[in-house]
């Protein structure tokens, strides 16, 4: 099997092993590099056309690997061709073709509009380096969203102060979107707006969207956020008496050469 598919499948299953993908929860899309498309071209043996509810002309002609709607992450390694697929965005950005996988009438994730709009946003703010958009349902960051108002500054400070690594991994902070119906255009627009500023966006009472250049970077981002949320909830339950100060966060950022979001510091 082609390496890009092996790496994609591994990330799907790693997320399941973390407990982030109950039933058919969560989804993953990857914008393929030209050499990866060529490596996979021999697999392209079908073509089903689908329409999109949003205009993604900025992605015209791009190829993506996507999980399937209603498919289970735990089954991806067992039958990749049934649970994931490769699609190509139309030249006018109003639809796509399924070129491989998603067999037996499957379609890409119902969150495909959110994914594609997030890809556009992150491509624009990373000079094209972002290739991965990942949606998962980690329990701790979802639980944390019940304990605060949907405020990025509040959330980011909690995470930065919960685990020293966080300010280095996501110095921009983490966005948070209040509850909305998933799978539609409205939540796609709002998520893509926030992800221009933050590499990850929490969906209150639901889960998280993460982005990155590689599978490892993206999985690591979500993993770090989830671990910090777990630490915070445990510490809060035990009783927090001290934490990392803003000045210590500044010192940390300087030591690692990252630019921490000063708007979120006092």
Image (tube, rainbow, N blue to C red):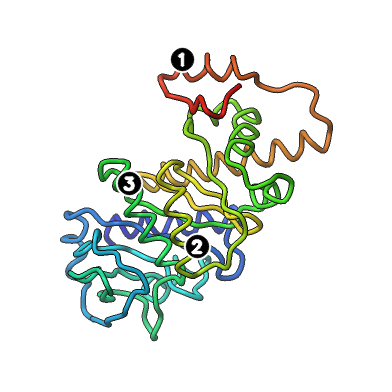
Instruction: Give neighbour class at mark 3: few <14, some 14-19, many 20+ (Cα, 10 Å).
Output: many
Give the side of residue 190 with respect to residue 33, left or right. Answer: right
Tell me if residue 169 can be seen: no
- CA gap between label 1 and label 3 equals 25 Å
Q: Residue furthest right?
A: 238
State the SS at label 2: helix
Q: Earlier in the sequence, mark 1 or mark 3?
A: 3
Tell me, yes or no, whether the two marked residues, 1 and 2, touch with CB atoms within 8 Å.
Answer: no
Measured along the vertical axis of the image, is residue 1 above or below residue 250? below
Which residue position is annotated with label 1?
Answer: 255
Q: Is residue 141 left or right of residue 30?
A: right
Q: Residue at x 52, y 48 (%)?
A: 201
- The image position of residue 104, as x and y in percent, is 39, 85
The C terminus: image quadrant: top right
Question: Does dot 3 land on a helix, a strand or a loop?
Answer: loop
Above-or-below relation of 57 to 225: below
Task: Residue under label 2, please give it.
Answer: 187
In which quarter of the view is residue 247 placed?
top right
Q: Secondary structure at mark 1?
A: helix
- Residue at image mark 3: 130
Is the residue under label 2 in contact with that under label 3 (CB below 8 Å)? Answer: no
Q: Which label number is shown at residue 34?
A: none
60 displayed left or right of 145: left
Residues under labels 3 and 2: Cα distance? Answer: 21 Å
């Amino acid at each position: 099997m082609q390496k890009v598919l092996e790496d994609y499948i591994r990330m799907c299953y790693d997320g399941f092993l973390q407990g982030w993908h109950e039933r058919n929860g969560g989804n993953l899309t990857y914008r393929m590099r030209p050499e990866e498309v060529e490596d996979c071209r021999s697999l392209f043996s079908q073509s089903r056309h689908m329409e999109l509810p949003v205009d993604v002309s900025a992605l015209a002609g791009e190829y993506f690997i996507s999980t399937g709607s209603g498919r289970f992450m735990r089954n991806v390694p067992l039958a990749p061709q049934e649970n994931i697929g490769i699609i190509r965005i139309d030249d006018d950005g109003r639809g796509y073709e399924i070129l491989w996988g998603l067999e037996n009438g499957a379609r890409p994730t119902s969150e495909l509009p959110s994914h594609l709009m997030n890809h556009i946003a992150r491509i624009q703010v990373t000079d094209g380096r972002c290739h991965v958009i990942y949606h998962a349902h980690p329990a701790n960051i979802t639980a944390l969203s019940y304990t605060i108002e949907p405020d990025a500054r509040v959330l980011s400070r909690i995470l930065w102060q919960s685990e020293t690594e966080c300010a280095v991994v996501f110095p921009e902070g983490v966005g948070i979107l209040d509850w909305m119906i998933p799978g539609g255009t409205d939540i796609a627009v709002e998520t893509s707006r926030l992800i221009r500023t933050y590499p990850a966006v929490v969906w209150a009472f639901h889960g998280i969207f993460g982005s990155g250049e590689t599978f490892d970077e993206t999985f690591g981002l979500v993993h770090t956020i989830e671990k910090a949320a777990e630490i915070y909830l445990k510490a809060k339950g035990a009783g927090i008496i001290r934490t990392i100060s803003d000045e210590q966060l500044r010192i940390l950022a300087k030591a690692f050469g990252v630019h921490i979001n000063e708007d979120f510091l006092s």
